[in-house]
Amino acid sequence: MKAEDEGQGGAIYLLGARRRSTTKATIKEVGSILEDVAPLWLAAPWDRVGLLLGDPQNRVTRVLVTLDVSVAAIREAESLGCEVIVSHHPLFLKPIETLALPDPRARILSLLWESRIAVYCAHTNLDVAPGGTADTLAQLVREALGWEERGIFGDVKAQEYYKLVVFVPRDYEEKVRNAICEAGAGWIGKYSHCTFRAQGTGTFKPLEGAEPFLGKVGEIEEADESRLETILPKQEASKVIKAMLSAHPYEEVAFDLYPLANRMREYAFGKVGVLPEGMSVGEIAARVSSYIYRWLERTVRLHGDAPEGPDHNQAWGVSFVPDGTVIFGDPQKTVKTVALVPGAGLDFAREAAGTGAEVIITGDAKHHAAIEALDRGLHVVDIGHWLSEAPVVCVLRDRLNEEFESRERDVKAFAFLDISNARKTFTGIGTRPSDAEASRAVRGLVPDRLPGLPFGMERPFRREPFETPEEYPRFEPSPFTAGPVLPTSTATAALTSKRAKDGVGGMAGMGQTDAGEASITMPLTARKIGSIRVYTDGASRGNPGPAAIGVVIVDKTPPGEGGRPGMVVERFSRYLGETTNNAAEYLALIAGLERAAALGAERVEVLSDSELMVRQMTGEYQVKNHGLRELFKRAQDLVAKFRKVTFTSIPREENEEADRLCNEELDRVTGELDRVTRD
């Protein structure tokens, strides 16, 4: 095993298995290996799988496996020298209407084309393939709960088989049998070279121009022959017949090929199983989400160790805390039959309920689909789309490295997860982790680039479990428990030992301490925040032009109500595309109010350096611009959700943190666009 240092902060990437060959591979060969792992015929009809971008004849030395083709994934592929990105989610599902920048998809395609990086997608075919996304999630649930699989459901597909019958002269049976079986015939379950042979007599008369293996032209010949028959997958028919004809001694080969009605192997998106004993829905949610997070903690390798001690002003890291899990139904309901579907799986709620399942573990549970599931008697545990699929990236990486080594190809596969895609847009309800669980964090220096987690070489699914049951967080139901999602910067909030004073104040004091006092890091926990201060800023370069927003949220809840006044609860930025300064200011306000509502705040103090927006929201100015009226109405609707909202106009220097976030996002995006356009 080999380690290479890459980039800032001593980033360590543990490569794949050691290679013993210098034989190169092409993109076409890599695609062939992936199609052996996840056959294309398993994909849903609407899906876009296979090679989506690139020349199949180009050479490959390194492959990056990831969930999404994001800017972060492309940069990671560039830094590692990867010629191919193997993504789970397609590069595009709908037709692209424009390649004009700064359209996000056009920007992604431009970066890929500039870097000469090909893209191969294994999506719904990997979901249902043996060892794929559903199997990976099932293995983790099995280790977390003791769950035992009992069946499958949801768009069940069956492998179609053919029966091949060929007549072979005596003494050539073994040669022909080995040829067709090595080409893919004769496999039944865990058995290979499965054939049947019967003896008989064949007759034929060679005609003029024939070159018979037995007999003479013009004379009827009788030959001792064997009837050799076997089964083969429909997709392997062409390859098997070619191998048979090559190995057969006859000039003209007599054989039959006909379809079978057998359903010997079935594939599906969902799995259902039973627990060894009853368990509450809340306990299932806590155990499964916690176990997968901890599994990722064991597998992920960050960029270094976080600084510790009083000499450091700030510690950075990524906290894997299962505070995004959502339960629909009664968390205290005891159940025993559990279904699971990775990704957005509630499309199969009816099929899951039909199996007798009492709860389904999935991601992206939309409101109306969840209500329908409840009406069918099916509780829903939404662990998040990202979390339900992230582990398969590591599993697929290992599978590819094994295949490259067994085929003696000088290719290495890496795995990468863009953790910015892990955040949910809402917060957990009824799944508050314990204090001990909330304090767990994977520590590491995060370099100045889009966040991502390179995977190490620890093999998943060892025989011993990762955690013992007593290490799981206990589920303690509450009427309503909400907490923040991971911030965009992927850094935990820096909590000052000196509390900021309540009231309208500048940003300069946040994250700092008095002399002799050290700032500490405190992971965000799922707790209700009663009163918050929201700093917002929006900017456009060109007016209209490329625009972005920056938002900083600070706790104002008094300590007596469980608050931590002065703590930065969350900071984030977002690129908007092209718009005006005023529209960007309103969009920053809307984003801040949406997060405030998600955090469960009742009282909100908004501070902005946009005097126009503040005076319009307080009613001092009318909204005359037609383009701003809709944004103004959206902001008003959000304000109505809170008990109290105040607006204050502040100087730009007192809004420096939100301003910095906004401009850093613009610098990053416009810098990439300028480089693409210039090159």
Image (tube, rainbow, N blue to C red):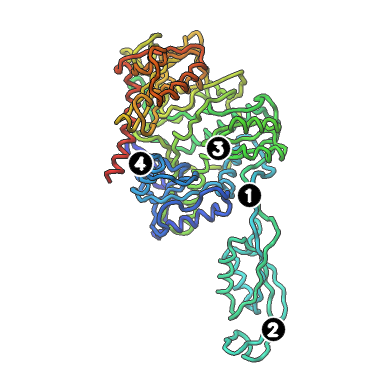
Circle nearer the viewer, 1 or 4: 4
Q: In which quarter of the image is residue 11?
A: top left
- The CA span between labels 3 and 2 is 61 Å
Amino acid type, callout 4? Leu
Say the numbered circle drawn on residue 388. 3
Amino acid type, callout 2? Thr
Q: In which quarter of the image is residue 149?
A: top right
Q: Are marks 1 and 3 in contact (CB under 8 Å)?
A: no
User: Between disc 3 and disc 2, whose residue precedes?
Assistant: 2
Q: Are marks 1 and 2 in contact (CB under 8 Å)?
A: no
- Left or right, residue 661 beside residue 166: left
SS of the residue at dot 4? loop
User: Quick one: label 4, few (<14), some, or many (20+) residues within 10 Å?
Assistant: some
User: Quick one: label 2, few (<14), some, or many (20+) residues within 10 Å?
Assistant: few
User: Between disc 1 and disc 4, whose residue precedes?
Assistant: 4
- Left or right, residue 339 beside residue 123: right
Residue named by callout 2: 203
Q: Vertical placement of 521 versus 401: above or below?
A: above
- The CA span between labels 1 and 3 is 18 Å
